[in-house]
Amino acid sequence: MFSYFHAIEFSAAGQMIKNSTWAFAVIESVHLLALAVIGGAVLVVDLRMLGFGLRRQTVAELARDAQPILAASLFVMLLTGAMLFMSEAVKCYYSTPFWVKMSSLALAILFTFTVRRKITRADEGRISPIGYKTVAVLSLALWFTVGAAGRWIGFSG
Amino acid sequence: MSLLPFCQWLAETRGSIALHESLYMYPLLESSHVLTLCLFVGLSVLLDLRLLGITLRRIPVSEVINRIMPWMVFGFILMIVTGILLFYAIPIRSYQNVFFRLKMITLVLAGLNAWFFHSGIHKRVGEWDSTLPPPRRARMAGVLSLVFWGIIVVSGRMIAYNWFDCDMNPPAAFYWAAGCVPGVR
């Protein structure tokens, strides 16, 4: 496994980002902008499932509007995230927060595009308030772990 | 008048030194500041996109504002509190950082934009609540908000880089813009 990480960092693209003064900072800024957007797209639906925010709309209605924003920002997150990873793959290999982030990210994506997608699209009457709340709490917990662990990659040497 | 003496005084206070030297408090504060982006900027983006008529199109603008605003205010308060504490931990370096200055100026512009919107076209929101696309002035407020908050987020992130710090001998224009004073850092 380590040899792959090493090869990625020492690939032409990895070295280009690593050796540039601005590249990492610029890519990370885009990563951060997309973080704000994906946060809004997730929160507006999760808050609604918890009974807050845009309560006069159905969950399904909000989820339909938020879906393209969620998908687009997630795409930008993954793209810029991969580029950041390439420039410091070896450091990531030894970073606990990195592995926490990748595990929770895999779970968050899986959960969002299976269970959460199904529940948010269901007709209003078919899902109990407890069902909505459970999905919202799990979604918030998973994405929070991704974000917090992600920020911590930078703090851990 | 320069705020530098105030920053120098602030940097010598016990709280500032404690925060600056703390192993966990500073990263925890910074993480909170960053993650609150999701709440405050994330919801602002949704509101701005609604003002542009791009998303949440079937929901009246007034309802989006009334329902989302309390959460944005909550996020904004968290942002301000954590932001002030981050500044308190490193006052002199922040004050003499071009990105920090750009961020503060843009914050004022974003505030003015919000104020113009709320005291202007928003007062007559009843007339265009569900009109698509929303009136030009509402769309303008949305675009400006997206641009300003984008600059604020990016320049905020850039504060962490020391490219133009006073002790890095930056180009003359940056030296001036950062308000560098020889011997002070």
Image: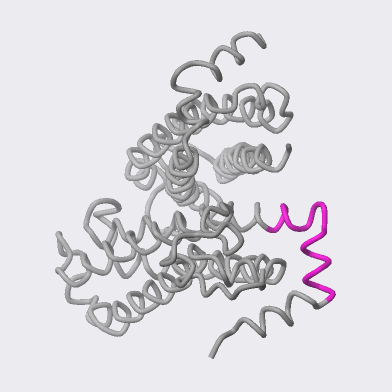
Which residue is depicted at the point 62% across and 81% down? B4
Q: What is the quadrant of residue A103 in the picture? A: top right
**Is residue B83 or residue A36 the one in the foreground?**
B83
Which residue is depicted at the point 69% across and 29% down? A100
Q: Position of residue B57 (x, y in %)?
A: 24, 54
Which residue is depicted at the point 46% across and 72% down? B176
Q: Position of residue A113 (x, y in %)?
A: 46, 27
**Is residue B2 or residue B24 the one in the foreground?**
B2
Residue B21 falls within the magenta-colored stretch? yes
Up/down of B53 relative to B17, above or below: above
Q: What is the quadrant of residue A111 in the picture? A: top right
For this view, does B97 lie left or right of residue A30? right
Q: Quadrant of the C terminus of chain A?
A: top right
Q: Position of residue B31 (x, y in %)?
A: 65, 52
Q: Work out which residue is located at the far bottom of the displayed protein and give it.
A: B1
Residue A146 falls within the magenta-colored stretch? no
Q: Position of residue B116 (x, y in %)?
A: 30, 81
Chief secondary structure of the magenta portion: helix
Write down the region rendered in magenta: B14-29
Q: What is the quadrant of residue B75 in the picture? A: bottom right
Which residue is depicted at the point 74% across and 29% down? A96
Q: Quadrant of the N terminus of chain A?
A: top right
